Image (cartoon, rainbow, N blue to C red):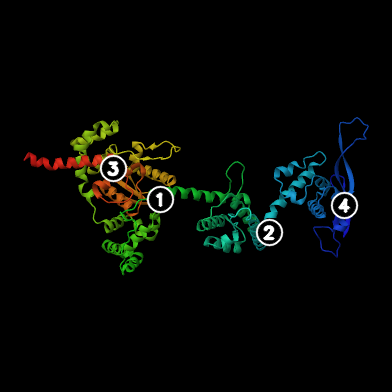
Amino acid sequence: MEHSEETNSMGTVVVSTQATSDEEPSQFVNIEDFEQIPIIGVMNVENNNSTSNTNENETSADVTFTCQQLIQKYASSNADILELYALLNSWNVGDLFPYCCRQHLYVGVLRHLTPEMAISILNQPCIPLGAQVEFYHHWHNWMESARSTIDVEKAECSSQSITSKSSMNESNSAQQSRAMEAPLDLNTILKSNQYGLNLIAVFNRDKILNDNLRKLMLESILQFCIENKHDLTVKDCSVLAAQIVQVFPGEVMAYYFVERKNSAPLGKLYHKYRNWKSNLNRKSSLEKSTKSIVGNPSKTFTTEKDEEIHIRALRHEMATMSYDEKLAHWVGCAATRLNIIQNQNNPQSASKIFDLWPQFKNPDGYRMIEADFVFIHGQKNELLDSLDAFVDVMVEEIFPKHRESFKSSEDNDMLNKLSDKSNNLSQNSSAAMTFRLMQMLLPFSRIEKKLTTDPKRRFYSIQESREAFLTICATETEYKQKYDEKVKRESCIPPFMTLIGTIENFHSIMVDFENITYKFYSFAKAVDVCFKAYQLFNIAYPPKCEHLWDFLNREFYKLEYDGARTKPHTFVLLNELNAAKVRRSTQPAADA
């Protein structure tokens, strides 16, 4: 081992250690030789003996002392001084060694510096600017390379070590708290599902993570938490983010988790889980309002032996079938399909059913809805058969009695057009206007708050109730814009209708349901299919217009189901309709 002295840019002598030709170069010097080396560095010394009248109170002087003196004065062990000395000399800033010792800036402390701190700690008059720049440059590169030099296998062992240490800490704390959960382990999570296995396979091949692999990692962690019913806490996110940085070289912890004081954490890992949790809470609130299509929710259908034949035909021979053949196979496996639908007790079940039975997604998929509805309830075509007569009774008998209820100019204009037979309104327009006016006679839906601390009850406006039942768009472009807004706003889209054109003259009605669109040219047909979709897939009516759908059920379909919330106003309107029908049926006999 040889020691040499050279003069650096600051004019001070720096001691360097070099290996001889017979020795391997080493990052660290021998501790015995190291303690005897005189270190010359820049120290800030007060000039108390100066008699000159200068403006400087402090001067830079060369101070010589041994490493043993530095250790006794500043360091807690020989290892601290040895490691710091080797690191600073490798950065060509060995002159800063005494200053760092005096400030206790050992290697472990340097690892915790922020960029702002790394700049500020050397901002001293006794340290030249060039030395400050050189130190910060090497420190920045050192911190960046620290993340990318960890071997994957060593990191996995380190991850297992972290897990074992966490388990030891858990066992110690179990004496104080019995309800402590075991810490999460990244390796266990990645090997527990297909997302993680795919990630490991690609990473072992490419040795780098891209955005797609990072998404797989987040999905793997999310699926693990869902399957194990584990609520991912802030501490869990911090532990997992630290393990990710160790297992996958080059990854930045801030991408996955950043803890903040007095505010929610940042990072993809925390936000991914919390977004899923909030969506789950919103969907669970919808599940509470889910109703059954029949009085007995546990009803099952008896399957036939040949249903597998029909299912296989629908999957593999659909393109060559006629409509009658397709319908025959569809009805042949109805029991199997309806049993699956009955077991799906939430509004999101329809999308899963559509994946199993893609025939629903075809433009004529509404015919499959009708076939399944008939299989359960039998033929229910009263709305299609008697809607025109119903409109006549409402316009001639019911609306005149409630003329004072229609206060807006739009409502009065529609009522006048319906009453004036010379307008020659189409059946579609007359029915659409009748349903729009009828919502004035039914109770407005509301969200009821039972607790006194809850917010004030919210009553939906007439316009909100009407838009929830039938949205009117002047053009298909406007319809597509509103549909996209609805998709972004709502996680689960129940069946809803959109009229294209004006209510007096429209050319089509769209029924949308879970990214599926059925197009109709008959208002009665659109309402009929929409109602049957609600019943078939066990979906609750939208709160804003639930009383209108309930009225249609009691007037035309007469289906019984649990959870019906019929209001007195609905019974009043039903009684008035029955009385008007009796009068109209007896009026010809009285005239005769």
In the rendered structure, which disc, 2 or 3, sits on the residue that comes first in sequence?
Answer: 2
Image quadrant where one finds the C terminus: top left
Question: How far apart are labels 2 and 3 at the CA level?
Answer: 68 Å
Question: How far apart are labels 3 and 1 at the CA level?
Answer: 35 Å
Q: Classify mark 1: helix, strand or loop.
A: helix
The local crowd at label 3, few if under 14, some if 14 to 19, many if 20 or more residues have their Cα within 10 Å, is: some
Q: Which residue is mark 2?
A: 150
Q: Quadrant of residue 332?
A: bottom left
Question: How far apart are labels 2 and 1 at the CA level?
Answer: 48 Å
In the rendered structure, which disc, 4 or 1, sits on the residue that comes first in sequence?
Answer: 4
User: Residue 272: which disc?
Assistant: none
Q: Answer yes or no: is residue 473 visible.
A: no
User: Residue 68: which disc?
Assistant: 4
Going by the numbered disc 4, the residue's amino acid type is: Gln
Pointer 3 and pointer 1: residues touching (CB < 8 Å)? Answer: no
Q: Which residue is mark 3?
A: 506
Going by the numbered disc 3, the residue's amino acid type is: Phe
Question: How far apart are labels 4 and 1 at the CA level?
Answer: 73 Å
Q: Residue at x 40, y 59 (%)?
A: 355
Circle nearer the viewer, 3 or 1: 1
Q: What residue occupies the far front of the structure in this picture?
A: 175
In the rendered structure, which disc, 4 or 2, sits on the residue that comes first in sequence?
Answer: 4
Going by the numbered disc 1, the residue's amino acid type is: Glu
Left or right of 351 on screen, residue 373: left
Q: Quadrant of residue 303?
A: bottom left
The front one of 561 and 422 is 561
Left or right of 114 on screen, residue 8: right
Q: Which residue is mark 1?
A: 287
Vertical position of residue 485 compared to residue 3: above or below: above
Q: Answer yes or no: is residue 336 visible.
A: yes
